[in-house]
Image (spheres, grey):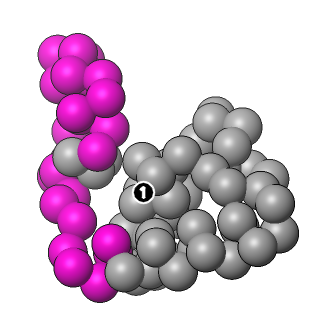
Amino acid sequence: MTVVLIMEFPQVLTYRKFSGRIVYPMPEDYELAYKLQLKLMKAGKPKPFSDLLIAAICINRNEELLTTTKTLKT
């Protein structure tokens, strides 16, 4: 779980089934999110920054991204 999710939905920390660690973005995550946004903007498909930052965190750590967020699926 990323700190981005916690900032958007603080109640997730009270979810009784939550376990694991909280991942904080590193400078390289912001850089990748920026580069992804540039490519998406050129294609006419910009995405919310928080979604791109979460995606960048997963990409940079070779983690699988599980989501129900439609903006990350396209």
Q: Is residue 18 above or below residue 38?
A: above
Q: Residue shown at 23%/15% (left/top)?
A: 11
> In x, y percent, where is residue 8?
31, 29
Q: Is residue 63 above or below residue 8?
A: below
> In x, y percent, where is residue 30?
33, 72
Q: Residue shown at 58%/42% (left/top)?
A: 67
Q: Is residue 5 left or right of residue 32?
A: left
Q: Quadrant of residue 27?
A: bottom left
Q: Quadrant of residue 19?
A: top left
Q: Is residue 12 above or below residue 3?
A: above
> In x, y percent, where is residue 46?
67, 55
Q: Is residue 72 above or below residue 57?
A: above
Q: Residue shown at 54%/46% (left/top)?
A: 48
Q: Is residue 36 left or right of residue 9?
A: right
Q: Residue shown at 21%/46% (left/top)?
A: 3
Q: Amino acid at mark 1?
A: Ile
The span picked out in magenta is 4-30
Q: Is residue 58 visible?
A: no
Residue located beneath label 1 in the image? 54
Classify mark 1: residues with Cα within 10 Å, few (<14), some (14-19) or many (20+): many
> In x, y percent, where is residue 50?
42, 48
Q: Nearer the viewer, residue 33 or 59?
A: 33
Q: Is residue 46 magenta?
A: no
